[in-house]
Image (cartoon, rainbow, N blue to C red):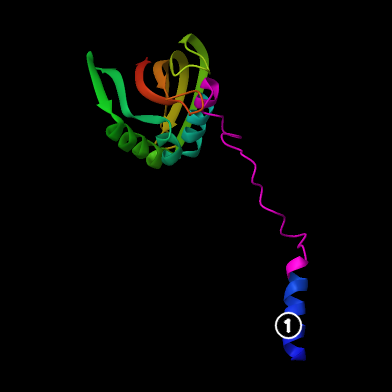
């Protein structure tokens, strides 16, 4: 009986102890901190760049809408592909590039704002990539992105990307 009482007393005492080396979990909402809040247009571009720099297809995929379309000029023809090809292509780039750096530069034109459900953003960019350190390529151009979302409480996603690279 004494052993059972002592055991219960130890369990109660140990349960009341706080371990200073195991602080409580931080339960504050930190959505979007550190890599840009994608509910803001500039935060969307920060998260886009962060996904490229870290080569994180999961993070990048959060930015691409289900009805996404990418267009670009290829030998005088206009090419278009959807989300599935975009994700496979980006995954291949992320996995195989030894050098990958994306810089979003000046906003050339913009409609919509952080309170809108749709925005059109023309923005200059610089992309440096290479599949070996000795073979780096640089692309400068402009991108026209159509960003959409159900409401201002939701993060922006690209529904269209028109690439105007040189």
Residue occupying image coordinates x 72% and y 87%: 4
Toward which corner of the image does residue 76 lie, by quadrant?
Answer: top left
Percent of width and height locating residue 18: 77, 62
Residue occupying image coordinates x 52% and y 33%: 50
Residue to which mark 1 is pinned: 7
The residue closer to the viewer here, 14 or 111, is: 14
The residue closer to the viewer here, 12 or 94, is: 12
Q: Is 30 within the magenta?
A: yes
Question: Could you tell me if residue 12 is visible in this image?
Answer: yes
Q: Main secondary structure of the magenta part?
A: loop
Percent of width and height locating residue 19: 76, 63
Hey, which residue is sitting farthest left in the picture?
77
Count of labels in the image: 1
Percent of width and height locating residue 147: 42, 20
Quadrant containing the C terminus is top left
Horizontal relation, residue 35 to residue 90: left or right: right
Hey, which residue is sitting farthest bottom in the picture?
1
Q: In this view, does 99 lie above or below 122?
A: below
Magenta-drawn segment: 15-44
Residue occupying image coordinates x 64% and y 46%: 27
The residue closer to the viewer here, 9 or 111, is: 9
Toward which corner of the image does residue 120 lie, by quadrant?
Answer: top left
Q: Is 136 within the magenta?
A: no
Percent of width and height locating residue 102: 48, 27
The residue closer to the viewer here, 129 or 160, is: 160
Horizontal relation, residue 88 to residue 108: left or right: left
């Amino acid at each position: 009986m004494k052993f059972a009482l002592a055991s219960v007393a130890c369990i109660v005492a140990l349960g009341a102890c706080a371990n200073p080396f195991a602080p409580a979990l931080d339960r504050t909402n930190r959505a979007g901190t550190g890599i840009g809040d994608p509910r803001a247009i500039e935060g969307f571009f920060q998260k886009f760049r962060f996904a490229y720099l870290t080569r994180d297809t999961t993070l990048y995929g959060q930015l691409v809408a289900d009805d996404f379309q990418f267009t670009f000029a290829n030998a005088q023809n206009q090419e278009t592909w959807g989300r599935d090809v975009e994700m496979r292509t980006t995954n291949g780039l992320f996995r195989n590039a030894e050098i990958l750096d994306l810089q979003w530069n000046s906003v050339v034109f913009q409609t919509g704002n952080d309170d809108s459900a749709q925005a059109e953003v023309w923005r200059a960019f610089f992309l440096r990539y290479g599949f070996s350190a000795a073979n780096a390529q640089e692309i400068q151009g402009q991108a026209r992105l159509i960003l959409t979302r159900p409401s201002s409480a939701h993060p922006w996603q690209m529904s269209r990307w028109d690439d105007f690279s040189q």
